[in-house]
Image (spheres, rainbow, N blue to C red):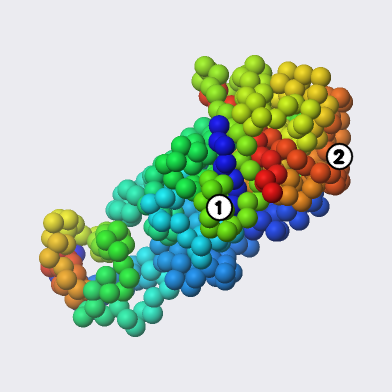
Amino acid sequence: MGGAVDESAVLEAVRRNVLAVVPDLDPELITPDRSLADLGCNSIDRADVAAMTVDDLGITVPVAEFGGVADIGDLVRLLVRHC
Amino acid sequence: MPPGVVVTGMGVVSAIGRDVPSFTEALRGGRTGITDPAGARITGWSFPDEVHRLRELPARLRDRATRVAARSPLPLRVAVVAALQAWASAELHDRPLPPERVGLVVAGSNLTARYCHDAQAECATRPGRLRPSFALRALDTDHVGTLSAVLGTTGEGCTVGGASASGSVGLVAGARLVSSGEVDACLVVGAMLELGPLERRALTALGAMAPPGGDPTAMCRPFDAGRRGFVPGEGSACLVLESAATARRRGVAAVAAFAGGVTRLAANNLADPDEEVEAAVIAGALRRAGVRPHELSYVNGHGSASPLGDATEVRALRAALGVDFRVPVVNSTKGLTGHCLTAAGVVEAVAAVVQLDGGFAHPNANLDHPIDPEVRFAGPVARSMPVEVALSSSFGFGGFNSAVVFTRPAG
């Protein structure tokens, strides 16, 4: 996407997809310092959130790179690097 | 087969009732759920509300059910509620068995046809839309994993398939796990198959499914001269089969005895029914149950309203029961629930047990001109009668034939 996407737009995309996967969640809880696991996402939920956000952003991210993601902030920064 | 296998719990979710009491009342009143041209639909039903309603279950279990299954496809959410109802009625929450002594048989194959179709449509132009969870949710065995995760059971588990006879095939398999001593109790879940547009089209083209048209409530006509094929019904049900010994030890009353069951193939891969094998499973199940034909009070027929199937079934019943074919009252639950396909055998086992327990035979829907005037078909209103022995038969494409027998619990 040529670097035009900033972290807040990517965080918004992550937030939208977390809510699609875990609909009952309070959106205020989806912050960079929390992990998806803290928010009740299991390993399959996390894969869904990552894949849906990657698709929304129109980017490609090698699956192996998600291995180092500890919290939502890490996820956002990883996605931004590929935009 | 099973000396001492009893039914200690039941659950059902269908178009005519969201639990066993409402299902029983609908049967008694002969209320049909086929009010939509597409068949009998489960409407106005919410998974979290239905889980929440099961207040006798610990909050911990209800929360786990909601967390694990709230996002599962509809057939699985419906199965979880049916299983929780059965778990509660068998009192497995407060008179528990060791988790490794509880088995789980999910009856049905191709349960995710509709889910797969929808995912394919969504991803046709945009493969990136596919959620990785599809890899798990597309599997029939997701039912087994999810139900065991909700209930915490760790005994033997599997899916078993037998087309429209799946439910009955599952009951025979579950009873065998109990009677062999492999488990103390086994949940047998008749899982809901949600037809996709391809299945609907092919089943209609084959002449198996009634073509839509006219008054939906008059479409499904089991054992009637004017029958035009089956009408699909949404539903799922669960029976807890348990050894009489552990039920006694837990202090839980049996609602019925599972007295016998037989499954046989007919060496064919077509949609054709086989009179000889149908008669053999009916006679065989009665023999296993130690019941003579004249002692049979009630038959819950397969009765799908298939032109060839119903005619074959009536001939098989005559062949199996001989001169006593006029003794049992015969009805078809499918006229009210629609054909619950893979779940039908378990939905109808619940129907058979509640009629045994409640002493009645539910009406046959739309039976204006019975195909065999000598068979004792239930009429347009419920009949109060003692039911000592109930037989439920199920026949499926590909030569699957199965029958199960329930009797009143001992003591």
B103 with respect to B349 (left or right): left
Residue B10, numbered label:
none
Q: Chain of mark 1?
A: B
Q: Secondary structure at mark 2?
A: loop
Which sits in the foreground, B19 or B92?
B92
- Label 2 amino acid? Gly
Give the image quarter of residue B258.
Answer: top right
Up-down relation of residue B59 to residue B168 (above or below) = below
Q: Residue at x 56, y 42 (%)?
A: B5
- Asked whether B239 or A11 is in front, the reply is B239
SS label for mark 1: helix
Chain at numbered mark 2 = B
Q: Which residue is mark 2?
A: B379
**Residue B345 location, x and y as percent?**
60, 39
Dividing the picture into quadrants, the one containing residue B131 is: bottom left
Residue type at the position of mark 1:
Ala
**x and y percentages locating residue B402 in the rendered image:** 59, 30
Q: Who's the residue at 21% across and 80% down the image? A: A33
* B32 displayed left or right of B73: right
Question: Which residue is depicted at the point 70% across and 30% down?
Answer: B291
Q: Is residue B367 visible?
A: yes
> How far apart, in angstroms, are the residues tagged by discs 2 and 1?
37 Å
In percent of width and height, residue A83 lies at: 17, 66
Out of B210 and B33, give the one closest to the viewer. B33
Q: Which residue is mark 1?
A: B247
Residue at horizontal 86%, vertical 35%? B368
Placement of the N terminus of chain B among the 4 image quadrants: top right
- Looking at the image, can residue B219 be seen? no
B340 to B319, vertically: above or below: below
Q: Are marks 2 and 1 in contact (CB under 8 Å)?
A: no
